[in-house]
Image (tube, rainbow, N blue to C red):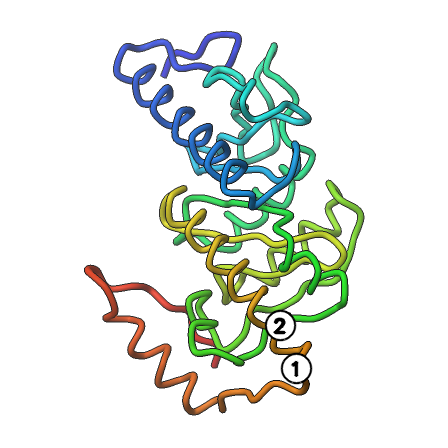
């Protein structure tokens, strides 16, 4: 497939597909920011594309980004000549895709309550049945590592191995989905659950659902909604 110096496919159909994919990443990042899920220039969005991914650029205000600013990063981490610098978290995005071949988009946010819990060293247990929306009986917390490092990428890959979302200690949250829209929806749901759990903790010790009930919920979630949802329940 012909590729120009900016990493853009040169055939008409290929150009159109790439433009649509870049626009999808950009629109998701704008929606994330406008919904208050990630303040300022924090957070990042990516989607699988060909033999790598398209990801938001580093340090740019979301409302200043144009589709051509979205960065293609190959599976081996290579960038095209002249491309913008990708998000500093590109390593854990690639690691997440390698861990989850069944997912095609990643949304990382510093949403308020998810970040509060992450900074307190708390995962989100089965205080509410909707915790199963992330694919298991809890939403785990992965250990802290400096942003942009391979160490953090390894932690994220492990945390997402059997979940579609996790909290990142002293950092924020990350969510995956079949599409950018689904990943963003999950990130928003995780933030709602984080806020609810935070408020429950303010009242005292939470009442948790048992593993048997969460197993039942996970099974029911597989046929919930208009299309079957793939749930990676922890064994």
In the rendered structure, the answer to whether residue 102 lies left or right of residue 235 reads: left
The percent position of residue 116, horizontal first and vertical second, equals 71, 60
User: Residue at the location (66% across, 53% down)?
Assistant: 172
Q: CA distance from mark 1 to mark 2?
A: 7 Å
Which image quarter is the N terminus in? top left
Q: Residues within 10 Å of mark 2 (few under 14, many from 20)?
A: few
In-front residue for pair 54/138? 138
Q: Which mark is residue 203?
A: 1
Q: Which residue lies most toward the front here?
A: 203
User: Residue at the location (73% across, 60% down)?
Assistant: 169
In the rendered structure, the answer to whether residue 81 lies left or right of residue 209 reads: right
User: Residue at the location (35% across, 85% down)?
Assistant: 216
Q: Is residue 111 above or below residue 208?
A: above
Q: Quadrant of residue 2?
A: top left
In-front residue for pair 122/106? 122
The percent position of residue 139, horizontal first and vertical second, equals 56, 69
In what element is the residue under mark 1?
Answer: helix
Tell me whether the residue at label 1 lies in contact with that at label 2, contact meaning CB atoms closer than 8 angstroms: yes
Q: Which mark is residue 178?
A: none
What residue sits right under mark 2 in the picture? 199
């Amino acid at each position: 497939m012909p590729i120009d110096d900016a990493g853009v496919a040169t055939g008409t159909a290929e150009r159109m597909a790439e433009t649509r994919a870049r626009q999808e990443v950009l629109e998701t990042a704008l929606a994330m920011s406008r919904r208050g899920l990630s303040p300022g220039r924090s957070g990042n969005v990516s989607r699988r594309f060909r033999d790598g991914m398209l990801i938001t650029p580093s340090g740019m205000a979301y409302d200043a980004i144009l589709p051509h600013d979205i960065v293609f990063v190959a599976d081996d981490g290579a960038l095209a000549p002249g491309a913008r610098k990708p998000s500093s978290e590109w390593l854990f995005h690639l690691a997440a895709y390698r861990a989850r071949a069944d997912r095609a988009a990643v949304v990382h946010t510093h949403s308020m309550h998810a970040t509060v819990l992450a900074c307190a060293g708390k995962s989100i247990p089965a205080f509410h049945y909707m915790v199963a929306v992330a694919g298991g009986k809890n939403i785990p917390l992965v250990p802290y590592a400096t942003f942009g490092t391979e160490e953090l990428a390894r932690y994220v890959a492990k945390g997402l191995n059997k979940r579609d979302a996790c909290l990142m200690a002293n950092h924020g949250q990350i969510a995956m989905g079949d599409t950018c829209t689904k990943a963003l929806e999950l990130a928003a749901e995780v933030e709602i659950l984080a806020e609810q759990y935070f408020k429950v903790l303010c009242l005292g010790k939470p009442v948790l659902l048992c593993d048997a009930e969460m197993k039942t919920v996970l099974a029911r979630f597989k046929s919930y909604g208009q299309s079957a949802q793939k749930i990676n329940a922890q064994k």
